[in-house]
Amino acid sequence: MTAITSGRVTIPAWRVMRAAWLRNRMTLTSLLAAFTAAAGWTLYQADSMRSWLIARHIQQCITPANATSSACEADPAWQKFASGFHPYTVLFLLLGAPVVLAMFGGVRWLTREYETGTFRYTWTLGVSRIRWLAGTLLPLLAVVTAGAMACGLAYDRWFPAGQWLASSSSAGEPWEWNEFPLTPLTFTALVLAGFGIAACAAALIRRTVPAMAATAVAVAVGAYLADTRLRPWLITLHPVTTPAPYGSPAGSLDGSYLLRGWLTDHAGQVAPGFLITHDGGMILPGGQLGTMLTTGSAATQRAWLAAHHYTYWISYQPHSRLLIFQAAWAGALLTVAIVAFGLATWRVTASQ
C-alpha cells in the first residue's frame, strides 16, 4: 500500500482516458448525436436547395455576377427560391451549438468527478493531477473537435447557395464577410473556446448548476464580442485605399468588403458631410454637392464630380484576405481556449 500511495506505481495515460471514456459514455453519445444532428440538418438543407435549383435548371444562379448580386437576380425562379428557404434555421442551429453543448456537455464532464469524489481515488493510484486532467479531457476534446469539423464541412456545402438567402440586401456585400464563424477552421476554434471556458468554470466552481450558468453567460458574451467587436476590428486593419468611379462597389472587385467611401476636392481636402459606410449607408452633405448626389444618373453624377475636380475614394478589404481574417479570428478564440484550459490545470494542481 505504501508503494501505491507514494506514487511509485504509474497508471498509463491510455487507461486514464479509457476510464474517462467509459465513465462519460452517455455524455459522449449525446454530444455525438448533437453534432450529427446539426451536420445532418445542414447537409439536408444544402441538398434540398441544390435539388430545387437543378430541377428548375437555374443552378448557375449561385455564381455571383458582381460583388453584390446573384447571376440571376431578376429571374422569377430565383426569386421564388430566395423566398422558399429559410437559412437562419441553419445559422442559429450552428451558432447556438457551442453555448448549449459546452454548458450541458463540457461542464458535466469535470463536475461529475468532483461531486462523486472519484478524482481523489484516481490520485491515490499514482496518477498525477495533470495526467488525470489530460486523460479526462482528451476524449472530450477529440469528440468535439471531430464534431465541429464535420459541422464546418457541412456548412461549406450549404454556403454556395445559402449565402444569397442570408444576405442583407442593404449591406451590398457578400454575406460571408459578415458571418464567417462557421467554416471548419473558425467553427472548430469557436467550439474549443466554449469547451475551454466550460472546463475552466467546472474546475473553479466544482458544482454543476452554478458552473453551467457561468459557462452559458461567458460563452454567449464571448461569442457576441467576437462577432461584434473582434471581427469588425480585424477587418479594419491595413485596408486598401484607392480612387474609384463614384457609385462603384469596392472598385468593382468581386467579393471585396467596402469599409467606407469619401470625396476629396481639388486641393485634396475631404469633402465635409459626405460618407458611404460599409453597410451601404450614405451621409450626404448640404448645398449643391448634396443636391447633385441625390439626382440624376450615376454617369451624370460622375461627370459633375469630375468637372468640379472631386475625386471619389474607397477603403476596402480584398476578398483574397478573407482567409487571413478567418485565421486571425480563429487564432484569437484558440488563445482563449488555451488560457481557459491553463486556468483549469492550475486550479486542479493547486487544489488540496
Image: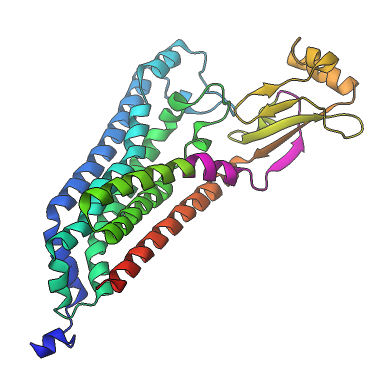
In the rendered image, the quadrant that contains the N terminus is bottom left
Question: According to the image, what is the colour scheme of the structure?
Answer: rainbow
Q: Is residue 282 visible?
A: yes
Which residue, as the protein is rendered here, is positioned at the far left?
Answer: 1
Q: Give the range drawn in magenta.
A: 226-247
Residue 89 painted magenta: no
Apparent side of residue 70 relative to residue 8 in the rendered image (left or right): right
Q: Can residue 60 be seen in this view?
A: no
* Residue at screen point 81% across, 27% down: 272
* Residue at screen point 44% across, 16% down: 78
**Which is more toward the observer, 140 or 174?**
140
**Which is more toward the observer, 121 or 281?**
121
**Which is more toward the observer, 314 or 345?**
345
* Residue at screen point 74% across, 16% down: 298
Q: Is residue 84 above or below residue 220?
A: above
The quarter holding residue 173 reads: top right
Residue 5: image location, x then y, percent: 14, 84
Apparent side of residue 279 relative to residue 163 in the rendered image (left or right): right
Q: Tag count in the figure?
A: 0
The quarter holding residue 51 reads: top left
Q: In this view, does 46 lie above or below 106?
A: above
**Which is more toward the observer, 299 or 129?**
129
In the rendered image, the quadrant that contains the C terminus is bottom left
Residue 30: image location, x then y, percent: 17, 46
Residue 71: image location, x then y, percent: 53, 22
Residue 83: image location, x then y, percent: 40, 16
* Residue at screen point 17% across, 62% down: 113
Q: Is residue 115 above or below residue 38?
A: below
Residue 231 painted magenta: yes
Apparent side of residue 180 relative to residue 320 in the rendered image (left or right): left
